[in-house]
Image (spheres, rainbow, N blue to C red):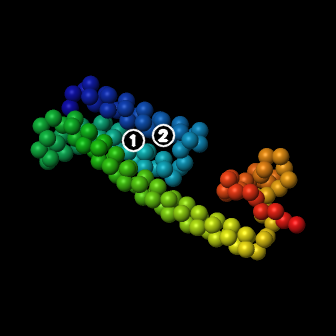
Amino acid sequence: MPNTIQIVGVITSGLLLFLVLELVRRRKLTEEYSFFWILCALALLGLSLWREIIDTSARWLGVFYPPVVLLLVLVFFVFVGLLYFSVIVSTYRRRIEELIGRVAILEALERRQEIPSPSVSSSTDGGSAMGLQSAHPDEDPPRHS
């Protein structure tokens, strides 16, 4: 692998690692999700530093230009990351749907029993002291006597 490509690979990997750590420090990225990105950056950094791994992998895969192996590894990590985050999004979607169902049940019970709602208050913004508003803005809030 030419030295220029190796230098670019090391710099890019180092920048990715720095970016992830900076995002964690600024609390823009949680530690839970940063693990995947740190792993990717370290793997790319390792592959950029140890040319023998790239050359051996290229021969084993039948790739004639060894730096392409770095691109293959990058594409692999992107696909794994997409799959990982798709699972997370699916899990959150299921949780949100479950919470929507629970809220609907609680609202139905509240209407049936005419329990004073925490979402109804006499404040000027139409919400409670906690800032909650009716789930159905086009409905008139229930009146309690």
Q: Secondary structure at mark 2?
A: helix
What's the residue at 68%, 67% (across, down)?
107
Q: Give the amino acid at mark 2.
A: Val
Q: Which tag, 1 or 2, sits closer to the chain's start?
A: 2
The picture quadrant where one finds residue 111 is bottom right
Q: Is residue 35 above or below residue 111?
A: above
Disc 1: which residue: 41
User: Where is 35 relative to 71, above or below?
Assistant: below
Q: Quadrant of residue 96?
A: bottom right
Give residue 131's position: percent from left, percent from top: 76, 51
Residue at image location 33% in from the left, 40% down from the top: 44
Where residue 70 appears, as percent x and y from the top left, is 26, 39
Q: Which residue is mark 2?
A: 20
Residue visible at 59% across and 38% down in the picture: 26
Query: Disc 1 to disc 2, how far (Cα)?
Result: 9 Å
Identify which residue, 34 or 14, lies in the foreground: 34
Q: How many marks?
A: 2
57 or 51, nearer to the observer: 57
The answer to which image quadrant residue 141 occupies is bottom right
Disc 1 residue type (three-letter): Ala
Whether the residues at callouts 1 and 2 have beta carbons within 8 Å, the answer is: yes
Nearer to me, 144 or 86: 144
Q: Judge from the rendering whether residue 133 lies leftward or rightward of residue 61; answer left or right.
A: right
**The C terminus: image quadrant:** bottom right
Can residue 46 be seen here? The reply is no
